Amino acid sequence: MNSLERILAAVTGDEADHQPFTMLLSLYGASLIKSDTFPYYRDPELWFDGQQAVVDQFDPDILISPFSFPIEAEAFGSELVFLKNYAPNVRKPIITSLSQINSLTVPDFEKSKAIQFFLKGNELLSQHYKGNRAIASPIHSPADLPSLLMGIEMWIDTLLFHPESVDQIMKKTVDHFVRLGNEFLAGGTTFLVVPVNFTNPMMISEKIFSRLLPYLESAFSQLKGPVVIHNGGCKIMGFIDRFAQLPNVIALVLEPTESFDKARLIIGDNLVLMGNFDGPNFVNLSGEKATELTLKILNNRKADKHFIFATSNADIPYDTPVEIIRTVVDTIRGFKKYD
Amino acid sequence: MKPNNPETEKKQDLIASLINEGEKHQAVELLHQWAVQTSFNEVIYNILEPMLVNWGKLWMQGKLSLAHGYVSGKVAEEFYLLAANDPEFKNSSVKARGTVILGNIEDDFHPLGRRLVGIYAQAAGWNIIDLGTDVPTQTFVEKAGEYQADIIAISAMMFTTAKNILKVRQELDRNGFSGKVKLAVGGAVFKLRPELVAEIGGDGTADTAIDAPALFEKLLGEKVV
């Protein structure tokens, strides 16, 4: 059974030869190939090299195509800041007043260097690992993207008090999301990963979420492939029933403090659950603690055929010792699932 | 604060319900009507502030979202602006509890949490000097000296920028402000990594913006005079 088959078994609910797993080792690829983060987040070939190094070191079942939401926002005109050993961040949003939404241009994929970084990186990985390993392509939710284009405060204010502007910008972000998502899928992506950093119960009320839901339903229904909803570092349990019912959703990644058992009670047994090892916390762990936390998750999901072990929250930090990640991987590999 | 009676509790619930529904204008309008019938002091101390304290507890328990916090902050901000124009309220205003220099640390461009802290702290009687986003270390320390501040309160959303706060700690110590100007820190990263508060030399943090005034009160009590 190869990695792709192992992941597909989790989707169909068939037994796998061992517990399928993935980790958010996108930034960590730069660390393994000893690259500065600035070129790494610009050059799809360096990204590919980084993911190959991840395979050589840890052999995960899923690889990540270029992942940086600020770079997606850059394609719309937002300004970035690059920091040593970290993924880039948005320095200055492109929209500073609602009147600018009208003139906001959806990126031309052919001309946008930012989008080409994503597409070429995905293409390199998909071609090389075709039929052998699952490729996950992170893409910003159309309801979350405005928080990077105008900032969180302005997006909350818009959602609360300016419904006509919500419609204006959502039409643009849905269009972008559907086109980019389908480009990824056409380029060989196995599934899209849609984090909900903004569209979650910690950030918005039920009322606002209900207002955004029709846009999400429309966007997801136009995708030509499967979608994984990722917690994005926030709790999603309050909205998980609605996420689970969105078109094309096959899996959900829980936040580290959330309960798989509770999620199963709400969404049933058929969708894949993923998680929920705290990725950014790797750097603070001893080997013993890493093993203990890994086993706790594995034992909880021992009989669950629709389960993929995964890190949750953001990237595993650049300076995490290789041995700690290796400890977690060895614990997963040595675990007797189903017994 | 007076003990609650059923009538004031009902009013608090009504405001909470309007905020919950995102009805900012109606909430401010209703508070204003009550202030005209009684006084701004009466509405602030017996309705709005107790409601916000309760709101803060619910927010901390994860029962409310950031958007709820945002609406309540906007309601408080707009109502305090109305109060500021009321001669009776102005005359009755007591001396500020203390002065806080507020800002996002260098390289941090996420203003929402900072702005909410400013609104709630001002509402609770603190003199707030808001320096905005991306504030260099030296500016925090200079402004603390200039305004004879009691507290510097710094917001950082991410781990990358939170680490810059350590430079403010070092600069405060180097300029002899240790203990005299307390360092409050806040932002999403400190909720995820509470140990970071001590690592970057912070004297304390609050889980939500609504809790910031209580933190400032505590730090003021710990201050070396």
Image: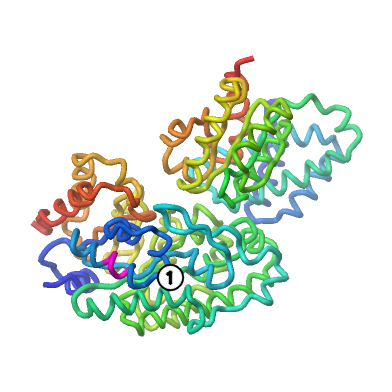
For the point 56% across and 25% down, which residue is it?
B174
Query: Is residue B5 or residue A132 the one in the foreground?
Result: A132
Q: Which residue is mark 1?
A: A139
Q: Residue at x 78, y 44 (%)?
A: B79
Q: Is residue A245 left or right of residue B98?
A: left
Q: Quadrant of residue A104?
A: bottom right
Which residue lies at the image location 59% right of the left edge and 21% below the top edge?
B176
The residue lying at 57 percent from left, 72 percent from top is A76
Q: Residue furthest right?
A: B87
Query: Where's residue A311, x and y in %?
Result: 30, 55
Residue placed most toward the observer, A164 or A82:
A82
Q: Is residue A19 above or below residue B217?
A: below
Q: Splitting the image into 4 quarters, where does residue B102 fall?
A: top right
Total marks shown come to 1
For the record, the magenta segment spans: A47-51
Residue B111 located left or right of residue A336: right
Q: Callout 1 environment at 10 Å: few (<14), some (14 to 19), or many (20+)?
A: many
Residue closer to the observer: B17 or A77: A77
Which is more toward the observer, B57 or A93?
A: A93
Q: Quick one: quadrant of the C terminus of chain B? A: top right
